[in-house]
Amino acid sequence: MSTTSSALSPSPRFWRDSPSSPWAQSPSSNGDTATDSPASTGTDKPAVAIRAEGLAKSFDGTVAIERVDLDVEPGELLALLGPSGSGKTTFLRLIAGLEAPTAGRILFGEEDATRLSVRDRRVGFVFQNYALFRHLTVAENIAYGLRVRPRRTRPADKEIRRRVADLLELVQLRGLDKRHPAQLSGGQRQRVALARALAVEPRVLLLDEPFGALDAKVRRDLRRWLREVHDRTGHTTLFVTHDQEEALELADRVAIFNRGTIEQVGTPDDVLDHPATAFVAGFVGEAVRLPVDAGESWIRIGPHQVRTPEENVAGPAELFVRPRDLVVARPGADDAIPARVIAVRRSGTSRRAELSLAADLPTVEIELPEGRSVRRGDVLPIAFATLRLFTSR
């Protein structure tokens, strides 16, 4: 993962000093407490696994989540990705205890958490709109979850101040403790929200579109910083996003939601390069869907016939094409098909050409080789470097 140039502070002392903490000091063989070891890298800290078994949720007869099974590994950062209304935020709220399931159960490790309250689940929740108290300072916002605890579980004032100071250092906001939210940038407010979630020593960290209200550059910087914080603290983390780039860059694995179910769970490479369903192929990675006819070893795209490296199920099919699936072929190559250039445009640091393969087909895009001169109206010989073919339902 990419990292930012600023160094993160060591794991906060209050986690190392707490007996239930991932950083708790372990007794030595002679019964004395061992001295602090160097800050953990996140690979040796215990963390809780999450399991959803047959989880379902309906609202007034409308199904939002339909019998979902999902295992989240201890210490994993899992992205929940899908279109609006696919059920990802409802699923997150079920894990948090903010909604009660219609059916199924939720396990934190070996503990059945299905009927536990939000407080007893010990989750940290970060909302898109920060949900900070405007009349409280940064330090008071971070300490809020500790100060409202019942007296028997509430840390001493001195301990709360220490926790807040350590978290301010972790989220790189030292010196801003006396400011109010209105005096902070959007990125700084989101860091305060994360620090507040971490202050209560959660077993699980849940983030609902945490960067949705921020501009593109701040989003990029914060997601890299969040990955560093996750690796340092080691919490099992679920985060909801509609931003594919964010999910694919930040997460260990991605769960693709659609209509209340999960279509695929896999690493970013898995869901990009090996989509399990037509929905995943079309949803992830700027794909264009082309209707085709398939034979045993070929497909017909409009008037063009293309050989396939594997045998197909003959009949109507769908071909999903991304810009990098196409290459400029040698003129006269056996596998080349002619494509007319409709437009040429920049996409970030690359140049793309929009191509028409046939009059009745959607246009596709190709990333042009560096230095290749192409103009609107040109005819390019192209070939398929990758074929993602699914049988039509």
Image (cartoon, rainbow, N blue to C red):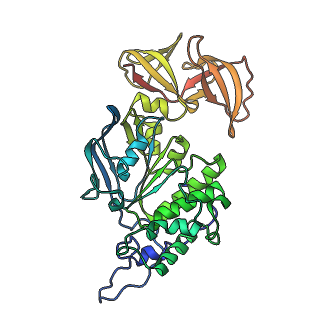
Residue sitting farthest toward the front: 135
In the image, taking residue 299 as reference, residue 367 lies left or right, namely right
* Residue 55, horizontal then vertical, whole percent: 29, 43
* Residue 74, horizontal then vertical, whole percent: 35, 58
Residue 224 against residue 257 in the figure, above or below? below
In this view of the protein, which residue sits in the foreground, 56 or 271?
56
Image quadrant for the N terminus?
A: bottom right
Image quadrant for the C terminus?
A: top left
Answer with the quarter of the image where residue 368 lies. Answer: top right
Residue drawn at x 65%, y 58% as measured from the top left: 182
In the image, taking residue 56 as reference, residue 268 lies left or right, namely right
Residue drawn at x 35%, y 19% as measured from the top left: 313
In the image, taking residue 364 as reference, residue 75 lies left or right, namely left
Answer with the quarter of the image where residue 152 lies. Answer: bottom left
* Residue 63, horizontal then vertical, whole percent: 34, 33
Residue drawn at x 59%, y 28% as measured from the top left: 327
